[in-house]
Amino acid sequence: MLRLSGAWLILVGIAGLIALLAVACGDGEDGEEGTRTPAATGTPVGTARPTGTAAATSTTLATASPAAGVPGITDTEIVLGSHFAQTGTLGAVYAPILSALKAYFEYVNTEKGGVCGRQIVLKAEDDQYDPAKALEVTRKLVEQEQVFAMVAGVGTSPHSAVWDYLNERGIPDLWPITGAHKWGVDPQAHPWTVAFAPDYAVEAAVFGKYISETYPGKDVAILYQNDDFGRDVLGGLEQGLDPSKNRIISQQSYEASAVDIRSQVTNIKETGAEVVVCACIPGFTAQAIKAANRMGWNPQWIVDYTNADPIMFTYASPLEMEGTLSTWPLKLVDADDPAVAQHRELMGKYGGGPPGNFTVTGHVAGVLTEEVLKRACDNLTREGLMDAIHSLQDYQPALALPGVTLTYSEDDHIGPEALQFLRAKIKDGKGVWEYEGELIHFSQQ
């Protein structure tokens, strides 16, 4: 083994002390990637850019230590963070995603020995679906908990409050559970954010095309959340509709903090709309459908995929939900499929809770995280992780529908670009979602 002389040891010690003083006198940023410099243009100050070439393939077994001082990386752990609604109504809605993500990591730690010879540790903070709270807990995770990366932050409004902060500091921001168009469309301005959910705007363009082909001549209304989520759906719907066949006669919005949206539903009903697109999260979707049902009004509802889980039949009855259309890119939890069978087994064995379409989402987010960490073992830094993500080409998660793949590059951080329609039906007295039609590729729109 190579031995250092006493003089060299002294020099190394002095160098280490200088490095520590440099960090202490710095501006408080986490990690070597996020140095803040004033920007001359409109891009966020301090935007750090991932660099380098493609990382090793998924067969990499190396467990080499990363460069000293990488936040969230120790000899035994990889520490990840997430902001997530865990309390209140929305906490109950999205709890299956978080429980499934935790269960998958527990499976990896227990049965595979972790990744890169390290255990995955997930620290998820409750943001109560509140943007200010999301920023507060994200700052805690980055500055106090020193997480390596953020994964699966839920909600367009909460995540909008944190993505500039994460990109300014060079923190990998992976798989936000929200399909806002902005996450993946401009990786030059936000190079550390990588989309996972299908794009809301493109999904809504699919809605518009479907409406014009299936319901020509019928008037259309939209009920939408007044944030990037809702506005993306509104813009996509306008783009997808054929104006010679359909017109939007009512646009009703609500705030994410609203309690009651029955007045908006009443306003739409009075216009006589026959097709209603709902860019709403589950609680508001259920409230709208139930209110319309009580008014004796039954338009064709088309709802965003954020509602495509069996949990919807607990918020609105199967009879009220019957006929509602949505979309989804993953296999349904009741499918007769080996990957779904494994998912159900893992959820039961590792505390993931009752399987549903949302637990499938959490499982896939876990699979993607494991995959890119494996590819980054030889360079377990934040830049190395981004290089690993950019090496994903036509990647097919086992739980994705055949033909739904993921491809990322430095110029493309958009998630899956294909999905399929679902329709709510009643079987044996229970509400179920069933696929309808063929897989739709966004390039066809």
Image (cartoon, rainbow, N blue to C red):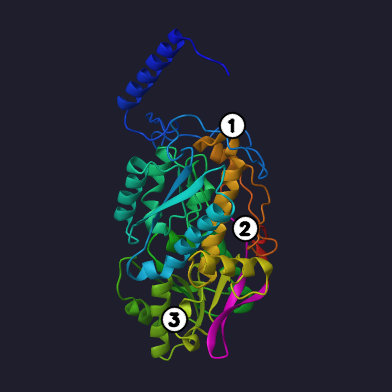
Q: Is residue 129 left or right of residue 441?
A: left
| Residue 61: image location, x then y, percent | 64, 41
Q: Secondary structure at mark 2?
A: loop
Amino acid at the residue labelled 2 = Glu
Q: Quadrant of the C terminus?
A: bottom right
Q: Residue at x 33, y 57 (%)?
A: 127
Whole-angstrom CA distance, mark 3 to mark 1, is 48 Å
Instruction: Give neighbour class at mark 2: few <14, some 14-19, many 20+ (Cα, 10 Å).
Output: many
Q: Residue at x 53, y 15 (%)?
A: 3
| Residue 400: image location, x then y, percent | 63, 62
Please provide the residue range marked out in magenta. Answer: 415-437
The numbered disc on residue 314 is: 3
Q: Secondary structure at mark 3?
A: helix
Name the residue beneath numbered marker 1. Answer: 52
| Residue 350: image location, x then y, percent | 51, 64
Whole-angstrom CA distance, mark 3 to mark 2, is 30 Å
Q: Is residue 119 left or right of residue 206?
A: left
Query: Which of the two labelled residues, at mark 3 and mark 1, occupies the earlier sequence position?
Result: 1
Marks 2 and 1 in Cβ contact (< 8 Å): no
Query: Which of the two labelled residues, at mark 2 and mark 1, occupies the earlier sequence position?
Result: 1
Name the residue beneath numbered marker 2. Answer: 417
Instruction: Give neighbour class at mark 3: few <14, some 14-19, many 20+ (Cα, 10 Å).
Output: few
Amino acid at the residue labelled 3 = Thr
Q: Quadrant of the N terminus?
A: top right
Query: Which of the two labelled residues, at mark 3 and mark 2, occupies the earlier sequence position?
Result: 3
Residue 40 versus residue 68: which sits nearer the camera?
68
Q: Residue at x 56, y 16 (%)?
A: 2
Using the rendered image of the protein, determine whether residue 196 is visible from the camera's viewpoint. Answer: no
Whole-angstrom CA distance, mark 2 to mark 1, is 26 Å
